C-alpha cells in the first residue's frame, strides 16, 4: 500500500548505514525476503512485478524495520479478519 516503507540498517565496518525502500504509488507494496545469505527488499506492483529491488548480505544486516502505511479508521489491517478461526 502506498506509504508502506522498510528501513534496512547495515554494518559498514564500524559505522552503520540506513537505507529505505518505500511503496511510492497507490497499489504498490514492499516485500522483504531472506534467501541464500541475502536480504532482498522489493517494491512490487499489484501484479507482483518488482519495480525496484535492494539486496544486502544477510551477515551485514543489523536490523530490518517495517513501517506499514496508516490505515483508514474502521479499515482492518491486511491479513486480519478479527474473527476466530473455526475448530
Image: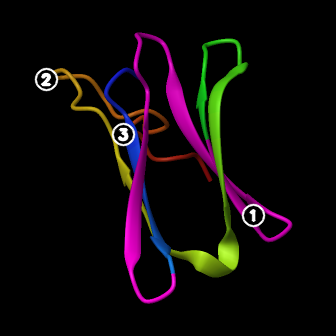
In the image, the segment drawn in magenta is: 13-41
Camera-nearest label, 3 or 1: 1
Crowd class of label 1 (few under 14; some 14 to 19; many from 20; radius 10 Å): some
Q: Give the image quarter of residue 68.
A: top left
Q: Earlier in the sequence, mark 2 or mark 3?
A: 2
Q: Give the image quarter of residue 35.
A: bottom right
Q: CA distance from mark 3 to mark 1?
A: 34 Å
- Relative to 18, is 54 above or below? above
- Relative to 25, is 38 above or below? below
Task: In the rendered structure, find residue 73 and report the number of the disc placed on it.
Answer: 2
Camera-nearest label, 2 or 1: 1
What residue is pinned by disc 1?
A: 38
Camera-nearest label, 2 or 3: 2
What residue is pinned by disc 3?
A: 82
Q: Residue at x 39, y 81 (%)?
A: 15
Image coordinates of residue 21 in percent, x first then y, are 46, 40
Q: Are marks 2 and 1 in contact (CB under 8 Å)?
A: no
Magenta stretch mostly in which secondary structure? strand
Amino acid at each position: 500500500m502506498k506509504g508502506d516503507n522498510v528501513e534496512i540498517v547495515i554494518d559498514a565496518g564500524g559505522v552503520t548505514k540506513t537505507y529505505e525502500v518505500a511503496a511510492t504509488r497507490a497499489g504498490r507494496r514492499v516485500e522483504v525476503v531472506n534467501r541464500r545469505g541475502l536480504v532482498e527488499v522489493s517494491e512490487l506492483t499489484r501484479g507482483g512485478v518488482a519495480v525496484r529491488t535492494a539486496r544486502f548480505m544477510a551477515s551485514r544486516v543489523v536490523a530490518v524495520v517495517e513501517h506499514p502505511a496508516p490505515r483508514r479508521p474502521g479499515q482492518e489491517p491486511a491479513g486480519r479478519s478479527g474473527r476466530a478461526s473455526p475448530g
